[in-house]
Image (cartoon, rainbow, N blue to C red):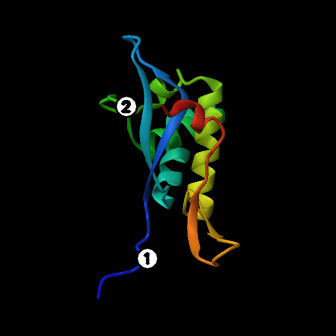
Amino acid sequence: MPNKNPLQTEFKFTLPRGLVDEGGKVHTQGFMRLATAKDEICVQKDSLVQDNPAYGFLVMLSLVITSLGDLSEVTPEKLENLFTYDLAYLREFYNRINQQGMASIPAKCPKCSNNFNVEIELSGESLATP
């Protein structure tokens, strides 16, 4: 019997400004997966984080962002080039999907009482979509 409510583990996002690579190309579309206990352990063991604990979130993002534009890999070093607005967006997005497990909320139509989900529009996301 198929599962009617499978656990969603990967979520699409759009950066408000985008990550500019060495060639000047802007990368805005990406996917982020849910974080695991193993990710938390990897962050704590990372030598960059041990030297500078503030680096921990960039290391975590590099583990959970499965793709970002055309980048072949997402590394903490590449994420250092994020605009602070995009970093704040990713922090909020990360917290929403990992604490709530989704990027949408249940809603109910006041007229017909139909239940449905509404996608959460995170700050800046509407600015980045064409």
Residue situated furthest top in the rendering = 23
Name the foreground residue: 87 vs 53.
87
Q: What element carries label 2?
A: loop
Q: Name the mark on residue 96.
A: none
Residue, x 57% and y 49% (percent of image)?
94
Residue flagged by tag 1: what amino acid is it? Asn
Can you say whether 109 is above or below 98 in the image? Answer: below
Name the foreground residue: 128 vs 109.
109
- Residue under label 2: 69
Residue, x 62% and y 54% (percent of image)?
96
- Residue under label 1: 5
Dot placed on the residue nearer the N-terminal end, 1 or 2: 1
Q: Where is residue 51 in the image (x, y as percent from the top left)?
A: 60, 31
Q: Is mark 1 on a helix, strand or loop?
A: loop
Residue, x 43% and y 64% (percent of image)?
8
Number of residues whose C-alpha sits closer than 10 Å to that of mark 1, classed few (under 14), some (14–19) or many (20 or more): few
Left or right, 107 with respect to 32, comes to right
Residue flagged by tag 2: what amino acid is it? Gly
Name the foreground residue: 102 vs 112.
112
Q: Where is residue 66 in the image (x, y as percent from the top left)?
A: 38, 44
Name the foreground residue: 105 vs 67.
105
Q: Inspect this view and state whether residue 55 appears.
A: no
Left or right, 36 with respect to 4, comes to right
Q: How far apart are marks 1 and 2 (CA)?
A: 29 Å
